[in-house]
Image (tube, rainbow, N blue to C red):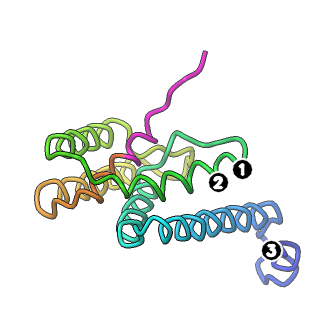
Amino acid sequence: MAESVVRNNRRSDVKLEHIEYMIHVSLNILLVGVTSLIISLFLNTTTELLIFTPFFLLLRFISGSAWHFRNDLVCYIFSSLVISIIPTIDFLTANYISFMNIFSLIVLLILSPISNNEKINSKKKLIFKMIGVLFVAINFLYIKNDIVSVSFFVQCVSMVSIKRR
């Protein structure tokens, strides 16, 4: 499939490896999404999933992540479970939600954005940081949606790198 895209592309700077990677990532995201949707149908949490997922992915896009699995199967299983099960948590008190929001704000202020892309200059990094902080702050202070707070918290936890010795 990637070879066909490269062969039929008018741009000469398109590399086969990049197209293969894009297809690989897209299929992984699609598989996680379909699996999570199926699980949510069984758990009767489709609404929660549909609220959690876009906010989680939006903040992940803006802020980056330190967690990446080396094995695609582990990534698929972990991602599907997190995206399917975390939105079912409905026993959190206001104190826990406040803690999650404050934790998220602190992590975003300190670590965001996590990027290996040298093309992103310091001005753009500051803009990404402020957008992420603004999202969490608006939810924390005005919207007050627990599922959105949990989605932001889970993303911010994924930003914290734990070094193995």
In-front residue for pair 10/42: 42
In-front residue for pair 124/38: 38
Pointer 2: residues within 10 angstroms few (<14), some, or many (20+)? some
Which residue in the structure is indicated by mark 3? 12
Residue 112 horizontal/vertical position (percent): 38, 44
**Mark 3 touches mark 1? (CB < 8 Å):** no
- For the N terminus, the quadrant is bottom right
Label 1 residue SS:
helix
- Earlier in the chain: of badge 3 and badge 1, it is 3
- Earlier in the chain: of badge 3 and badge 2, it is 3
Residue range (magenta): 154-165
Which residue in the structure is indicated by mark 1? 73
Residue 68: quadrant of the picture: top right
Which residue in the structure is indicated by mark 2? 76
**Mark 2 touches mark 1? (CB < 8 Å):** yes
Distance of label 3 from label 2 (alpha carbons): 33 Å
